[in-house]
Every structure is written in C-alpha cells, then in structure tokens.
Image: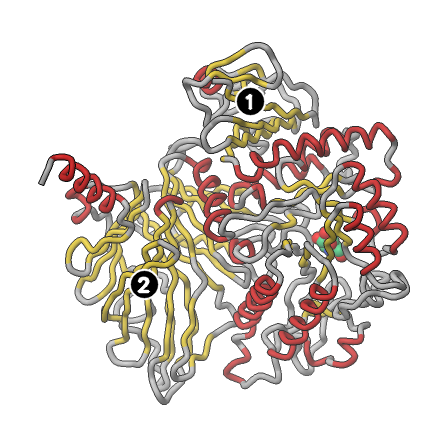
Amino acid sequence: MNNRFVILLSLFLVSLSSSAQISELSDKDWMLETETMSYRIGIRGGRLNTFYYGPKVEGEEKSTVRWNEFPEVPVRGVGAWNSPLVEAVFKDNVRDLDLKYHSSELLKEEGYDVLRILLKDSYYPLSVYACYRVLPNHNLMEKWLEVANIGKRDDILIENLQSGAMWLPASLYELTHLSGSLGNEFQPQTTLLTQGVKTIQSRDFKSYGSSYFAVRPRGEHDEFSGSVWFGQLLYSGTWRMDFERLSDGALQISGGIRFWDSWLNLTPGESFVTPKICFGYTQNGTSEVSQIFASYTREVLQQGSKHRPVIYNSWYATGFDVNEDQQLAIAKVAKEIGVEMFVIDDGWFKGRVNDRGGLGDWTVDKNKFPNGLKPLIKKINDMGMDFGIWVEPEMVNPDSDLYRAHPDWIFYFPNRPKTLGRNQSMLNLAREDVFQYLYKSLSTLLREHNIKYLKWDMNRHLTEPGWPSAPTKKQREVRIRYTENLYRLVDELKKEFPNVLFETCSSGGGRVDLGMLSRMDVAWASDNIDPLDRIYIQYGYLSAFPANSMVSWTGGENWHDMNYSLNFRFDVAMSGVLGIGNNIISWKSDEIAIAKEKIALYKEIRPLVHNGILYRLASPFESTHSILEYVSPGGEEAVVFCYNVSEKIDVSTRCPIEKKRLCFKGLNPDGIYQVDNSDKKYSGSYLMNTGIDYSLHGICKSKIIRVKLLK
Ligand code: DGJ
C-alpha cells in the first residue's frame, strides 16, 4: 500500500467514525452523539436503562461514562417508583407493566441514524419500541415510543403514554419555560426546581406558551454561556412536561400527550405512535438553544423553508366588513408600497356579517362578493401580488347551513349545555365525516381559486369534549384522535397544494408548536400588535421558533396610550415575517413614503432575518432594550434591530465589559467591517469585544444597523 492511500484510507475511517450518530459500544450498550452532546443508554438485567445525557464524551470514556442509572422508559409496574411514561391495564385488571429487552435495529431516515429498541412485557401481549433519531449537525435528538397490542383476543387500556424521559445528574436546577395568555404570549418564566414536580401543560388545544423548556444549574449561566438541557414536544393537542426533582437532587424530565380525561383503548393488532420530543444539551447558553430550534425547524421540519412574502392582512383595517371594491382599493395602495401577498382575513364567506354566523360554510358570501372571489383574485394577481385567505375550519356557528344540517357534528354531552365560545362550537374532527367535509370544503376552495396563502385560525377553548356516537371505549380517545385528524387534514391539503403557504393562528399565538410548524409554514404570534408589547412577545417567541415563522404586522394598535411612530412600528414588525395591517387607504403621502422605504429595506435584509443566525444582544425582560442580531452563517453580514422599551439610567446590553455598548456576535474576528454607511472601518474582533456606542435614546425608539464584511 502506498503512503498516500494509507493516509486517504485513515482519513476516510476517521470521517466515518466521527459521523457516527449512534453506535453500539458493546453488546446492548448504545452511545448517541451529536457534534457536542452524548447520550448513553443500555440494557441491564434485561431492562433498558439510561446512564448519561450531557457534554460530548470522547475516546475510551464513552463506554464507561455514567452519571446515574435510571429506567429509560419508566413504567407503572415491577418495583418502579419513577414518574411513568407508560401506564396500562390488561383484561384481568392487572395494572403492572414489566418491559424486557427483546431486540434492536439501527436504520437510516433522511440520512439520520434511527435506533429502535423493542421491549416486550414479560407476560402480557404489549410491546413498546423506544425510538431515537439523532440529528448531529443540529445538536438535537428526537425520541418517541411506539406501543402495540400484539395480542389476538383482548383490548389493552392505555391510561398514560408519554413520549420520553431524560435524567439529569444531581444539582440544583432552574427551569425557564414560556407561559402566556391572549395578547401576552411566550413570556419567559424562570423558576427554581425544588423537590417535587413542576408541570407545565395545556388543558385544551390552546397554549399561548409552549412546551419549550431550558433547564440550567442555578445561577451559573447567561445567554451565551453555561450548560442548558433543553427540548420541546412536536405536538398541538393537550400536552404536559414534568420536571421532578428527586430527594438526591437528580432531575427527571418527561413529557408527551396529557392524558387527563383521556385514554387509548388498543384493540388486538392496534398500535399508537407518540408525538416526538426533541431534546439537546449545550454549554453555550440559551442563545444556542434558540439557534438550534431555528435551524431544526427550518432545515429538518420544514425541509428548507419556502420564501415568505411581504403580507397585507385586512383584519385590523376592515374587520368583517369586506367587499370587492374596498379590498381592491386597499390592494392598490398595498401594491404601491411593495406588498407581495394580499390576504383577506375573516368576513368573506357566506353569512359572515359578524362573529355570530357563517363558520362552517366555506363558500363566498354573494352579498359581499356578488361575482365570487375570482374577479378580485384576478385583479390582485394582475397587479403583481399573490392572494391569500382566512379560514377557521375546526369551528361552526349555530347560525350556519352546516350546523343546521349536522347539529351532532360538534363536541357535546347529552343532557348538558352546549356552551359557546365567541358564539361558536367546535367540530369534532375525530369523526371521519367531519374530516371528509372539511377536506372537501377546503380542497374545493383551494382548487377553484388561485389562493397562495391560507391563514388557519382556531378561536375557542375546548369544553364538553363528548363524542356520544362513538363506541364507549373510544369516547375518551377523542382529543388524541382529533389531533391526528387535524394533522392528517393539513398534511393532505399540503400534499395536494404544495405551493400554498399555511399560517397557524389561534386567537393570536394560541397554537404555535413544532407539531404545527412541521406542517404549517408560519405562525401568527399574537393579536397584540402594539409594538411595545410585541417586542416582548417576539423575544420570547424567538427562544423556541425561527424568525422566518413569526408573522408580524404593523398596525394602528396602541394599547398603552403611546404615540408610536410608524418607523417604530415597522422596525418591530421587520424582525420576523413582515405584514402590514393598517388601514392604508387613509395613509397620507408621508406615511406611504415611510412604508415604501421600510418595505424596500426589508426586502434587502429579508434573507438575513429569515435564514441568519440569531443572537439576542439584549433582553427586554432584563434590561431597557431588546436587541436582535441576525448574522449570515459565514459572518459576512449582519443586521441588528435595536428597540428601547424604556429609558432608565442602567442601560444593559450583553456586551461583556461595558453594558452601555453594543457588542456584535458571530462576525469574523479578523475581518474588516463597515457599519451602516460610515467611512470608519472596524475589525470583527473590535465589534465583538469592544463594541460600538449604543447611541439610541428615548422610549419606543428603534434603529436598524447593518454590518458588512469588506475584506
Ligand atoms: C383571531 C385572529 O387571531 C385574528 O388575527 C383574526 O384573524 C380574527 N381571529 C378573525 O376573526
């Protein structure tokens, strides 16, 4: 063998071993690895246990690393005392599970390693696959369970089935999660995890927060440094995440579907796949967590996100009162200022004069649009804009043709009131006839019209989740089956209409999660478009989801009696997917000029905002500013949004030394940069370490700084 060949061969072997995502260290002992994290599991005494979840371990230590030994799939049964992932009841009323290792397989899925470990009950016909997918370049793993009734005769009742558990070594931890309410979504909350269980959860299909979690050792961290164990669920139904600190200080994190008032009745041969939970570990603070979730959503879940246009939305301008002439008049101005997608919100369909009627009848209202929607869409297309529309498929008003024909299609219990929310009931999408009706209505709408954007709303809480026509054993599956059919509906529509962009909305940001963002392209973060409030909401949103999913409009909203400038409103909306929500026909020439200039600038910086790496240089929750920097992956270019939320003397950016300066991140230290159009040049290391003056004064003032690499 000549030397060159030996070198090439060893390089090849090194690259093979370093790209290993899952390896079997020894018999039935596995190491799961990303670029910076390791996760070790293995079989002991016939059971699947977990040993390690933390910083990457290299070399020989891989096969010995262990900071605790706990069940990887804790169950209710056989001496186990941990919070269970699986709770089953067999025909003879035995409620005790005993899962033993059976076999394992290593597969590839979209180029990623997938490990499936089959566990079987030692007596009853129940099998559980513990499944893992490792995404090394995203520093993330996914896990989920697949449970099957492999018997021939009897049903098995599943009273609880979570997606996965992770164990952290003994320490004192803080949990940061995102809580929220209507108009106040995605608010970060940090709490100490003392002995006992802290649960975050959703009770129905709305959350306003998210299952996002970031767990850090108490006090030893900031945005850019320190250990973080993090994750979130890919699910839009009812969910829960539990954080249980044990008496010795170890922490069990587990999560999945919330089984409150729910069960699964598995008939012989039937199986169920839980939603995935994705999880990771970093030593680089919560900043890296937000970057990981952004790249995972864009590149894995959305497989390279589609281009997002500048949107106009009619809701705040015209409400329910829409018609062809008026929308065309608005569209003319929208075109002039640079809008690319013109969206008619609520009010366009049959009988929809206010929120008391119409939901369910997804055909055009002939009183408002006597010629249908086609002429309007054509004129909008002729102007050079695409057309989008609002729907709320899962709902029905009692005053609708649909309800009159099928009053039994809603959730209800006999002998109980059918309560309304926003004058509407919720269709029971677990039913196949409801699924078929919605598929037909929506696919017809999309097939017959040149619609390129669908805003999918959902505006009420779930109450009385009764399904009286289902077999008794299936009735309590209703929430789970609803969510399955919701996903199926969106998936089928996406398959048939791949060029339509979908927006998830639920009275603002009530249903934003990675289950939705695996299917829908973008999300409405909040109905609160007061720019000051939005700064906080958007900061929280960006902890868990990417900027190119965050739809943000300008508007006339003013929740705090502040005299916001149009510049400020634009600057806030431009750090996501820009939309215009104002009544633009009443705009004066100076407002039109500002809008034109801002939208033109936005189109220039859009690739950075949508695909750049986000660094949050100041938090409005911790300081008087929010500063968001989006940097191109190679550090050649950056755009920084600076917002003053109040003005106190203690300006506090995240500059390492001088808190009143602005220190960039992600630049090339040796590169020479230009900041805006100034003649002065700076080295990347100066901009990152010494920083420039943060010269922005005044409450609700903003500015956008652009940085370019010259050489
Ligand atoms: C609630 C949404 O959050 C709003 O943006 C708007 O679409 C209304 N519904 C329409 O009814």
Viewer-closest of 691 and 453? 453
The CA span between labels 2 and 1 is: 49 Å
Type of amino acid at the residue the image marks with label 1:
Val
The answer to whether one can see residue 187 in this image is no
The answer to whether one can see residue 240 in this image is yes
Residue under label 1: 707
Which picture quadrant has residue 450?
A: bottom right
Q: Position of residue 91 (x, y in %)?
A: 37, 85
Other-residue count near label 2 (Cα within 10 Å), few / some / many at <14 / 14–19 / ≥20: many
Residue under label 2: 73
Type of amino acid at the residue the image marks with label 2:
Val
Other-residue count near label 1 (Cα within 10 Å), few / some / many at <14 / 14–19 / ≥20: many
Residue at (82, 31) in percent of width and height: 591
Q: Position of residue 392 (x, y in %)?
A: 70, 62
Residue at (17, 40) in percent of width and height: 10
Q: Is mark 1 within 8 Å of ligand 1?
A: no
Relative to 235, residue 21 above or below: above
Relative to 58, residue 397 above or below: below
- Taking the image as four quarters, which one is ligand 1 found in? bottom right
Task: Specify whether 653 is left or right of 59.
Answer: right
Report the label total. 2
Q: Position of residue 309 (x, y in %)?
A: 66, 44
Residue 56's tag is none
For marks 2 and 1, the one nearer the N-term is 2
Relative to 105, residue 60 above or below: above
Residue at (49, 41) in percent of width and height: 190
Residue at (54, 48) in percent of width and height: 305
Which picture quadrant has residue 153?
A: bottom left
Position of the N terminus, as image quadrant, is top left
Closer to the observer: label 2 or label 1? 1
